[in-house]
Image: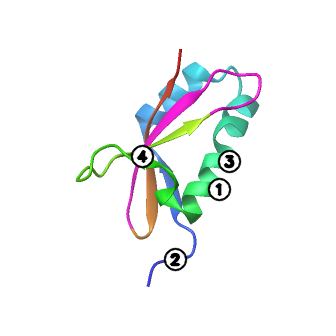
């Protein structure tokens, strides 16, 4: 039986990209906290890139900031944040 909340794991690439997007630690946390909460409980909330792909996408549209796209994979126990990109 799967856990009710999956563990979030951030790749080094994700961490580097997040540092580039967010100007300080508080901004970085506030940018992804909602996505962490949501995806730990329901990783199907995003969009699967292709029918057989393991990679999913979640758009994050924070108030007063540019939108970002979060790329992730998941299994029964974990959600792996792979990449985050700022949208134009």
Q: Secondary structure at mark 1?
A: helix
Assess whether residue 66 is covered by the magenta stretch: yes
Assess whether residue 80 is covered by the magenta stretch: no
- As displayed, is residue 41 above or below residue 32? below
Name the outermost residue toward the top: 88
Name the outermost residue toward the bottom: 1
User: Distance from label 3 to label 4 (Cα)?
Assistant: 15 Å
Q: Quick one: label 3, few (<14), some, or many (20+) residues within 10 Å?
A: few
* Tag 4 residue: 72
Lower position in the chain sequence, tag 2 or tag 4: 2
Left or right: 73 as drawn, with respect to 59: left
Start and end of the magenta stretch? 61-75
User: Distance from label 1 to label 4 (Cα)?
Assistant: 14 Å
Q: Which mark is residue 37?
A: 1
Q: Which mark is residue 3?
A: 2
Question: Which residue sits at x=47%, y=59%?
Answer: 44
- As displayed, is residue 14 above or below residue 65? below
Q: Are marks 1 and 3 in contact (CB under 8 Å)?
A: yes
Q: Secondary structure at mark 3?
A: helix
Lower position in the chain sequence, tag 3 or tag 4: 3
Q: Are marks 1 and 4 in contact (CB under 8 Å)?
A: no
């Amino acid at each position: 039986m799967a856990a009710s909340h999956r563990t979030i794991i951030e790749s080094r690439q994700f961490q580097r990209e997040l540092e580039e997007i967010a100007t300080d630690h508080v901004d970085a946390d506030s940018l992804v906290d909602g996505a962490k909460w949501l995806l730990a409980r329901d990783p199907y909330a995003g969009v699967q890139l292709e029918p057989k792909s393991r990679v999913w996408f979640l758009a994050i549209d924070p108030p007063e900031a540019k939108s970002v796209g979060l790329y992730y994979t998941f299994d029964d126990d974990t959600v792996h944040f792979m990449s985050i990109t700022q949208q134009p």
